[in-house]
Image (spheres, helix red, strand yellow):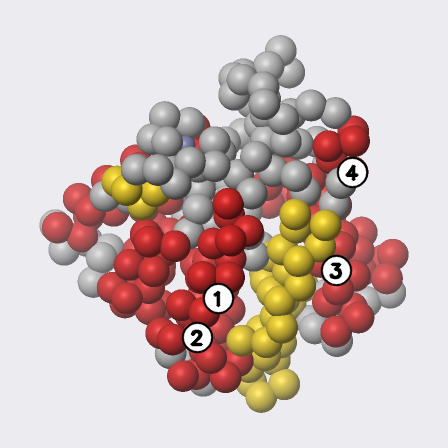
């Protein structure tokens, strides 16, 4: 795909399946792509090591991508651990809470992340911010919704007197469709890279290698990834989305 010579994007990149697919999506569309990650004391801190492996893997996959992929920034945020206990930042059980949201919900997390991404994009002269948030198949997080992202775009543009664009390529895709998107962007090599090097499991487990990648196999994030992979496999086999 041809790109506009001055086009630029900042990808919120965690080292997971979704943000890796978004990064490949951006590398196909923008001439200059930078990445931003957050170390917020997550239990699954292993995903931060995955980031490095995925970045070098993407460079190996395509000379065009290697040329376009620019600096990576990892920001450290202690504030969520200071604020209080969630199942993503502390050793508490992953369950549904009285609010109807899972205990893995970190209030304000994506609001802060996207505001910091906007600040970095502003500083680097980048117009597009890409995030892998998704409303379909999602874990019930209100800060992943389309309306939240649209409102945030308005808020950061007003607050920074800017014209930043928040792009959410996965917003309306199922997990199976996200696998199919990865295949369409980088073929089987990208699918293999995602299987082998991205991290999804909330428990931070890399112990077992399943057909869909590494993880405990029992937490909500693993269940979602496994179900998506299975559905993607069925559709590919029937000549649906995989080609
Ligand atoms: Zn898991």
The percent position of residue 37, horizontal first and vertical second, equals 63, 55
Q: In the structure shown, which secondary structural element does the residue marked by tag 2 occupy?
A: helix
Foreground residue, 143 or 211? Answer: 211
The percent position of residue 196, horizontal first and vertical second, equals 33, 53
Q: In the structure shown, which secondary structural element does the residue marked by tag 3 occupy?
A: helix
Q: Specify whether residue 171 is in view.
A: no
Residue closest to the far left: 238
N-term-proximal mark, 3 vs 2: 2
Q: CA distance from mark 3 to mark 1?
A: 21 Å
Q: Is residue 42 above or below residue 170?
A: above
Q: Is residue 222 above or below residue 123?
A: above
Task: Name the quarter where the C terminus is drawn.
Answer: bottom left
Q: In the structure shown, which secondary structural element does the residue marked by tag 4 occupy?
A: helix
> Which numbered dot is residue 55?
1
Residue that numbered label 4 is attached to: 79
Q: CA distance from mark 4 to mark 3?
A: 19 Å
N-term-proximal mark, 4 vs 3: 4
> Which numbered dot is residue 75?
none
N-term-proximal mark, 2 vs 4: 2
Q: Residues within 10 Å of mark 4 (few under 14, many from 20)?
A: few
Give me the residue at 55% from left, 51% from top: 48
Give me the residue at 72% from left, 50% from top: 76
Residue 136 relative to residue 227: left or right: right
Q: CA distance from mark 3 to mark 2?
A: 25 Å
> Which numbered dot is residue 59?
2
Residue that numbered label 3 is attached to: 118
Q: CA distance from mark 2 to mark 1?
A: 6 Å
N-term-proximal mark, 4 vs 1: 1
The percent position of residue 182, horizontal first and vertical second, equals 35, 60
């Amino acid at each position: 795909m041809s790109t506009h010579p001055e086009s630029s994007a900042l990808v919120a990149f965690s080292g997971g399946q979704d943000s890796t697919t978004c990064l490949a999506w951006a590398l196909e569309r923008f001439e200059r792509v930078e990445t931003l990650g957050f170390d917020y004391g997550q239990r699954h801190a292993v995903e931060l090591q995955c980031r490095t492996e995925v970045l070098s893997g993407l460079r190996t996959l395509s000379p065009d991508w290697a040329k376009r992929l620019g600096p990576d920034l990892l920001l450290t945020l202690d504030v969520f651990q200071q604020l209080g206990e969630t199942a993503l930042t502390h050793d508490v059980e992953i369950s549904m809470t009285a609010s109807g949201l899972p205990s893995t919900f970190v209030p304000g997390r994506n609001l802060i992340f996207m505001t910091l991404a906007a600040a970095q994009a502003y500083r680097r002269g980048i117009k597009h911010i890409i995030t892998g948030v998704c409303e379909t198949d999602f874990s019930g997080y209100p800060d992943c919704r389309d309306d939240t992202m649209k409102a945030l775009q308005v808020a950061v543009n007003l607050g920074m007197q800017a014209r930043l664009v928040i792009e959410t390529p996965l917003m309306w895709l199922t997990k199976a469709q996200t696998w199919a998107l990865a295949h369409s962007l980088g073929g089987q090599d990208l699918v293999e890279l995602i299987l082998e090097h991205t991290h999804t499991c909330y428990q931070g487990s890399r112990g077992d290698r399943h057909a869909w990648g590494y993880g405990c196999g029992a937490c909500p994030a693993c269940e979602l990834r496994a179900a998506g992979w299975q559905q993607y496999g069925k559709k590919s086999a029937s000549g649906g989305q995989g080609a």
